[in-house]
């Protein structure tokens, strides 16, 4: 599934943690690692600053490259200049990259609350899965992956994410967790809300059954399912903590029209708050 893994790096601590995950996946899949540094021309004040910035970028790439080669993983490196997320996506397309592994925030100022703007744009626009990693408070790497969670709302992106989750679960001989969260906050307390909740529970069970069938078809035997009630991103975060989840795999957006215009609100909040790595997956039509 993953033959070429791109690791964009700006030398930040979170980018450094993403390197560890990228190398781990490359070893598991016998993949090539491509290390890329992009000089942000927008952030530079003067043209004379470009060459020193490129030289510094080559140093960053060389340091990461040494770590990759120490693990006996095939390596390609490059330094480019331009708008970071644009260059990352262009490089990924030009080199048939299968996965992008990157930190959730880099060296620049915090934007989009807790997700760096570069990461946000890559996650939203990439036509390949994106693994985003944040530094864990306890220093753990959550790797290798023993418990993998795929949340589902029955949308096409959730189904597509399930394919990736099932492949990773099989490769790591892990346990697959399938979770559907019923968001009861918009419901009132009248009879209509009770009917609506029954319908939501039925939809959740159907969504889980569909992915469980996918997992069985993929040969997985260790599968756990759960339907929970609450705010989706908060419930996902709680489930991660209570079930020792090492990796979350989810679609970039859900069923709502707003989610389809932007990075899905649930996905965005999961990226902001969940401490473990997250793989985001789009469907093909999302990127056209």
Image (spheres, helix red, strand yellow):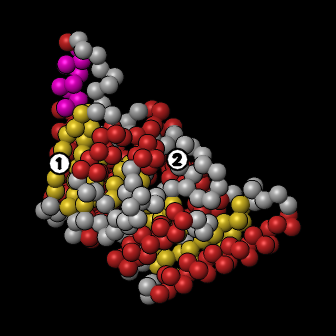
Secondary-structure class at tag 2:
loop
Please provide percent x and percent y for residue 8.
Answer: 56, 67
- Identify residue for label 1: 225
Q: Residue at x 47, y 79 (%)?
A: 32
The part of the image, by quadrant, that contains residue 63 is bottom right
Residue 198 lies within the magenta run: yes
The alpha-carbon separation of the residues under discs 2 and 1 comes to 30 Å
Residue 165 against residue 230 in the figure, above or below? below
Residues in magenta, as a range: 192-201
Q: Residue 160: where, in percent of width, then height?
A: 34, 52
* Residue appearing at x 25%, y 41% in the figure: 180
Quarter of the image for residue 152 reads top left
Residue 203: % across, % down: 22, 34
Question: Which of the numbered marks, if any, corresponds to residue 114?
Answer: 2
Q: Is residue 39 magenta?
A: no
Q: Quadrant of residue 118?
A: bottom right
Give the foreground label among 2 and 1: 2
Principal SS element in the magenta part?
helix
State the residue at coordinates (46%, 47%).
272
Residue 205 relative to residue 230: left or right: left
Q: Position of residue 47 (x, y in %)?
A: 85, 64
Q: Residue at x 55, y 81 (%)?
A: 65
> Of residues 265 and 237, which is closer to you in this image?
237
Quadrant including the N terminus: bottom left
- Please tell me how crowded label 1 is: few (under 14), some (14-19), or many (20+) other residues with Cα within 10 Å: some
Q: Earlier in the sequence, mark 2 or mark 1?
A: 2
């Amino acid at each position: 599934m993953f033959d070429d893994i791109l690791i964009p790096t700006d030398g930040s601590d979170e980018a450094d943690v993403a390197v560890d995950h990228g190398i781990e996946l490359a070893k598991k899949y016998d993949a090539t690692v491509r290390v890329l540094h992009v000089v942000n021309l927008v952030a530079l004040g003067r043209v004379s600053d470009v060459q020193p910035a490129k030289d510094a970028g080559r140093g960053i790439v060389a340091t990461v490259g040494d770590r990759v080669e120490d693990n006996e993983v095939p390596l390609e490196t490059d330094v480019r200049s331009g708008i970071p997320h644009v260059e990352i996506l262009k490089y990924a397309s030009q080199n048939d990259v299968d996965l992008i592994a990157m930190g959730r925030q880099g060296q620049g100022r915090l934007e989009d609350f807790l997700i760096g703007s570069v990461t946000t744009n890559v996650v939203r626009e990439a036509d390949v899965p994106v693994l985003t990693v944040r530094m864990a408070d306890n220093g753990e790497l959550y790797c290798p992956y023993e418990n993998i969670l795929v949340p589902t709302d029955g949308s096409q992106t959730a189904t597509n994410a399930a394919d990736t989750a099932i492949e990773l679960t099989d490769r790591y001989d892990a346990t697959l967790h399938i979770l559907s969260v019923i968001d009861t906050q918009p419901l009132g307390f009248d009879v209509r809300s009770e009917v609506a909740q029954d319908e939501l529970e039925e939809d959740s069970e159907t969504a889980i059954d569909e992915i469980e069938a996918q997992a069985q078809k993929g040969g997985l035997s260790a599968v756990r399912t759960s339907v929970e009630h609450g705010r989706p991103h908060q419930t996902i975060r709680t489930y991660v903590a209570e079930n020792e989840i090492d990796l979350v795999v989810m679609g970039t957006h859900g069923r709502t029209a707003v989610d389809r215009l932007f990075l899905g609100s649930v996905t965005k909040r999961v990226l902001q708050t969940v401490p473990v790595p997250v793989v985001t997956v789009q469907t093909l039509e999302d990127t056209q």
